[in-house]
Amino acid sequence: MVVDVEKRNRPIGVFDSGLGGLTVVRELFRTMPGEDIVYLGDSARVPYGIKSLETVRRFALEDAGFLLGQDLKLLVVACNTASAAAIEVISAASPVPVVDVIRPGVAAALAAGAGPVGVVATEATIRSGAYQRAIADADASREVHAVAAPLLVPIVEEGRADDDPIVTHVLCDYLHDLQRIRPASLILGCTHYPLLSGAIGKLMGPDTVLISSGQAAADEVRRRLEKDNAKNEKDTGGQLRCYTTDNPQRFAQLGERFGGRPVDVVEYVGTDELERYPHSG
Amino acid sequence: MVVDVEKRNRPIGVFDSGLGGLTVVRELFRTMPGEDIVYLGDSARVPYGIKSLETVRRFALEDAGFLLGQDLKLLVVACNTASAAAIEVISAASPVPVVDVIRPGVAAALAAGAGPVGVVATEATIRSGAYQRAIADADASREVHAVAAPLLVPIVEEGRADDDPIVTHVLCDYLHDLQRIRPASLILGCTHYPLLSGAIGKLMGPDTVLISSGQAAADEVRRRLEKDNAKNEKDTGGQLRCYTTDNPQRFAQLGERFGGRPVDVVEYVGTDELERYPHSG
């Protein structure tokens, strides 16, 4: 087998509407500590989850186009809303493999046990039906309970902790029906939600397995790179280079909470520059 | 005096980051039912209040540039965050008078009574210090208590009613100190907040006058047009034409709650088109 060393050394590209995708980066580094990562957070246009699917699709194609210009070996769509709206068009346009956060999360949820599957996600993700379709495609007999939870992203972005009373009140409001149903697994269908997993786990109880899309996506990336013989030979010291469409200092300040490590290198890229990238394959 | 009939018939331009500015449009129609209004809601990039002032300034200049291309007689910056970040640069670049929502709200709050003034607004507005400066400029002896309330915009956008328990919990959290201080007036420093004025008024009690920036701005627009002899001679039947950077159907559906009347005409304008407008005067 011909080993393409140059390819192995290329970075993985990851994008999200803002900071949330750094929770996926954290899982990527945990799984593959030697890989280099280029991250784009579209903080000037965050959040995607309250916008129409057409708009999210346009933004996601621009984000993907910008990262694909960085000589990647693989692209991760680390935003559930963008995955729901645009995974097909991005995959069709990409010369490298594309991993989203929906399909790996669904596979992990179905494998976690028999019984109903719960999904909590942004309004746009739930409205798109992407989780409902992905679960039906994999196992048409599974009962699915999907809940839109628009306030959870701003709550996490505000920096509220897991034990904040407002967090508890809002979660009780959204998870009320799911608590009664007691699903076998609950997909945290937004990259912000792992930061609330303590509170969500407490409310759902020990019978429901919480599925973080980030961890499932990182496992899928590892499998994909191993299959293509494209894993970096280093197993430590992977670098993280970030781009943001809003203020880089602010991104660096807030990013550590999401990524679990300091964000050293952040550069600004304007949305006007992103809009120069093609909108279709 | 030469009366410029053509000028009198021109529309007033109004922009906001999304739907919130329609609460200002409602006050404009209540005050001047014969004026035509062209509204731009930048729903694709909403909210502005969690973003850096540089980014908000850039977006606001684009929004203003687009509307100034519509042959206006006056421009209203119906977004507190945009007013805080960009009123000086917009005024400098505009060939027509510009009315913001901060200065009229401050004047109304100071006139409402002696004693401390409270301000509740988005994170970016409070961080900018615009309200604090405007109050100090008008009356340096006034005590000011400014509170950032990042969750209120998403709560209103989610459609939660004034009497929703989550609304009460979140307001109690933000207004805790202000309830103790009992200011003479409390400025609702974001165009979304008038939709929560029932709940806010109940928490603050009868001694605090709530100031809606929209009403104060509408009074200022009327004064300005009367001074310039530019009021429309019609006193009924003003038309509303809207543009949005996200899905027009969605804008029309949700807009009625904010504007208090059906939104009939909504057209799409892309953020890529907005970005063609100059970023400085």
Image (tube, coloured by chain):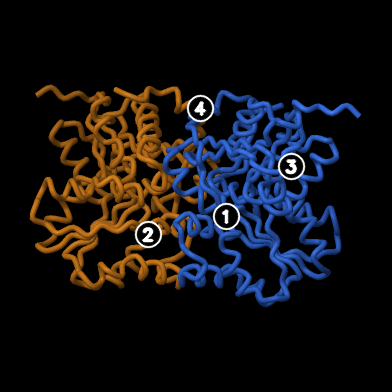
Chain colours: A orange, B blue
Disc 4 target residue: A272
User: In the rendered structure, the residue with mark 2 lies on which chain?
Assistant: A
Residue at mark 1 to residue at mark 2: CA–CA distance: 28 Å
Q: Quadrant of the C terminus of chain B?
A: top right
Residue at image location 91% in from the left, 29% down from the top:
B1
Describe the element under mark 2 as helix, strand or loop. Answer: helix
Disc 2 target residue: A195
For disc 4, the neighbor class at 10 Å (few under 14, some 14 to 19, many from 20) is some
For the residues beneath circles 3 and 2, the answer to whether they share a chain is no
**Is label 3 in contact with label 4 (beta carbons under 8 Å)?**
no
Check disc 3 and give the amino acid type: Val
Residue at mark 3 to residue at mark 2: CA–CA distance: 41 Å
| Mark sitting on residue B276 | none
Relative to A260, is A249 above or below? above
Residue at mark 2 to residue at mark 4: CA–CA distance: 31 Å
Which of marks 4 and 2 precedes in the sequence? 2
Residue at image location 49% in from the left, 27% down from the top:
B272
Image location of residue A259, percent across then percent down: 39, 50
Residue A202 appears in which quarter of the rendering? bottom left
Describe the element under mark 1 as helix, strand or loop. Answer: loop
Q: Nearer the viewer, residue A51 or B88?
A: A51
For this view, does A259 lie left or right of residue B194?
Answer: left
Disc 1 target residue: B192
Which of marks 1 and 3 precedes in the sequence? 3
Q: What is the tally of numbered marks visible in this picture?
A: 4
Residue B57 appears in which quarter of the rendering? top right
Disc 3 target residue: B99
Residue at mark 3 to residue at mark 4: CA–CA distance: 28 Å
Residue at mark 3 to residue at mark 1: CA–CA distance: 18 Å
